[in-house]
Image (cartoon, rainbow, N blue to C red):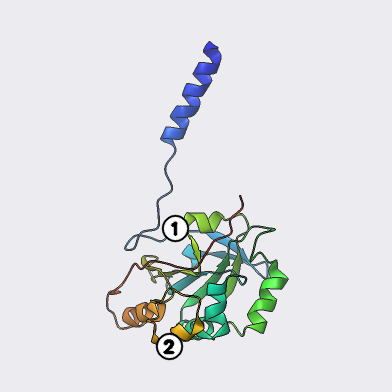
Amino acid sequence: MFKRLKYLAAAASIALAAPAIASPQVGKTAPDFTGVDSNGARVTLSALRGRLVVLEWTNHGCPYVSKHYGAGNMQKTQKAARAMGAIWLSIISSAPGRQGHVDGAGANRLTETRDAAPSHVILDPKGVIGRKYEATNTPHMFVVGKDGTLLYMGAIDSIRTANPADIPRAKNYVTAALDEIAAGKEVSEPVTRQYGCSVKYAY
């Protein structure tokens, strides 16, 4: 019994001493990660310093994601960001057997059939990157500055529905943030409330 108590006490002290994973916070350095894309290439966020980076959590089976891809809004936003020199990372954190999970070939087919324009599609089936960013919804968006600072996190736009008819009268927060960054301004709405389907992490 004494040995067991000593073991539990030691385990507790190690747990308390372990550094907590910092939550993503606007104005702070964005959490670094390395992921594998749909073509098997390794992508490390910190290696992209000097470029704006947009992170998009996605799930093709989610009606909120379908809203933006079906209407061409996400593709338009991707292409505008890349025309500004940004790197666009679409991240799939759906676990195997759950809605939205695809392998690399499946992700590439989606990119082709939807005429999407990400720089990379990152496969995150264990949810490591998603949990690091506390991504809760699809879509959930983040903009990382050239110096690695998180500049925006939240929704793609201002109307929280799955109805594509709402897109024309919504404010696209990502486009607005990128335009302000390009103009040398601070992002006027750096944090918004994300909406969409829950990220389908492993149980």
> Which residue type does callout 2 highlight?
Pro
- Between residue 183 and residue 192, name the one nearer to us: 192
Give left or right: position of 34 versus 179.
right
Disc 1 residue crowd, few under 14, some 14–19, many 20+, Cα 10 Å: some
Q: How many marks?
A: 2
What residue is drawn where x is 63% and y is 66%? 100
Q: Examine the rendering and report whether any part of residue 117 can be seen.
A: no
The secondary structure type at the circle numbered 1 is loop
Give whichever of discs 1 and 2 has the lower sequence position. 1
Task: Name the disc covering residue 108, or none.
Answer: none
Q: Image quadrant for the N terminus?
A: top right
Q: Amino acid at mark 1?
A: Pro
Disc 1 versus disc 2: nearer the observer: 2
Measuring from the top left, give residue 164's x and y in whole percent. Answer: 50, 83
Instruction: Tell me where residue 180 sits by quadrant.
Output: bottom left
- x, y percentage for residue 187? 30, 74
Which residue corresponds to mark 1?
31
User: Camera-side residue: 44 or 161?
Assistant: 161
The secondary element bearing badge 2 is classed as helix
Residue 56 placed where, x, y %? Answer: 50, 70
Q: Residue 168 shows which numbered tag?
A: 2
Q: Identify which residue is drawn at 68% across, 76% down.
A: 108
Res 16 → quadrant: top left
Disc 1 to disc 2, C-alpha distance: 33 Å
In this rendering, would 125 be left or right of 51?
Answer: right
Crowd around label 2: few <14 · some 14–19 · many ≥20 (10 Å): few
Q: Position of residue 45 (x, y in %)?
A: 49, 64
